[in-house]
Image: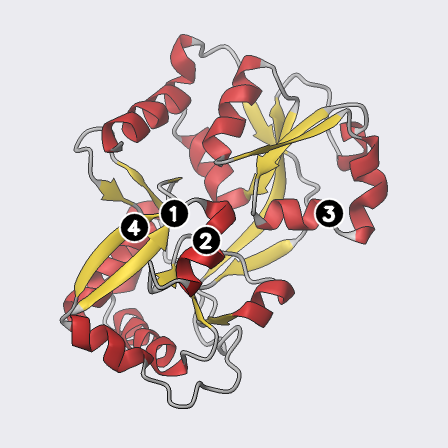
Amino acid sequence: MLILAAAMLTCVLSACGDNSQKFVILDENFGEEEYAIGFRKGENALAEKVQEILDGLYTDGTAKNIAVKWFGSDVILKGNDFASKGEANSPDDSLTYITGKGTFVLGFDKEYPPMGFVDDKTGEYTGFDIDLAKALCAKWGVELKLQPVDWETKELELSSKNIDCIWSGMSVRDDRKEIFTMSKPYLANAQVILVGKDSGITKKADLAGKKVGTQAGSAALDEINTDANKELKDSFAGLQEYSTFYEAYLDLQAGRIDAIIGDKTFLEYIIANQK
């Protein structure tokens, strides 16, 4: 599976041999947002411990070095409050659950660079979130286990304890605050529109009559489905949901869709690393 995912990444970045098509992100977007780590609701002890270690990594410069490696500068947000932290479970044994088993299982989208993906040279999982989690677990003294998840069923994976957190460029949204305890936001993002440079699409309204793609279970899909965007959505020639943004990008390259609505972080990385 790692080899297949790495091959898919290589195909995407190389345009599978067709480098003539260029893509751009439109200036008009679907809103600014932030990323946070998601824990099971009420597991405040675990969330607080993870945040305590993260804050230490911010202070000692470790997190800054990781950010510079992946983004070229220190883009980490600091000084925020927890995105969502209500009443703790009674009892809240979430921290002793982790220390007792000695492992911290991170759920992530394995096809979501630069946050988490398969390195096509080593065949290993890598990315900004993964590097940060490795540094955190080394400081904590527990073993990090990386568990790829289907983004559409991430909530089920977490609630069933197949994973201990969702740490994969997860956007803070009101509906997620209701079902997760969420860390302090650590990275800024936006929901943007990616199109072919010569597509003639320059603004949201130009998506009327176009085939649009996005990832199932994503913040982008949530935004498209809001009442505020109903008229625009109804004007699309079609809305295709994909398991990953990679799949959407392959279809955009092939001309099967006209635009992608998705995370700026991911789409900027794809454009910057196209071969």
Q: Position of residue 266 (x, y in %)?
A: 47, 40
- Disc 3 designates what residue? 225
- Disc 1 designates what residue? 149
Please rate how many residues cluster around mark 4, counting C-alpha atoms within 10 Å: few if below 14, some from 14 to 19, many from 20: some
Mark toward the start of the polypeptide (3 vs 1): 1
Q: Are marks 4 and 1 in contact (CB under 8 Å)?
A: yes
User: Marks 4 and 3, Cα distance to the nearest angstrom?
Assistant: 29 Å
Mark toward the start of the polypeptide (3 vs 2): 2
- Disc 2 designates what residue? 154
- Disc 4 designates what residue? 147
Q: Which mark is residue 79?
A: none
Quadrant location of the N terminus in the rendered image: top left
User: Marks 3 and 2, Cα distance to the nearest angstrom?
Assistant: 19 Å
Please rate how many residues cluster around mark 1, counting C-alpha atoms within 10 Å: few if below 14, some from 14 to 19, many from 20: many
Quadrant location of the C terminus in the rendered image: top left
Q: Determine if residue 94 is in view.
A: yes
What amino acid is found at the position of numbered circle 2 in the picture? Lys
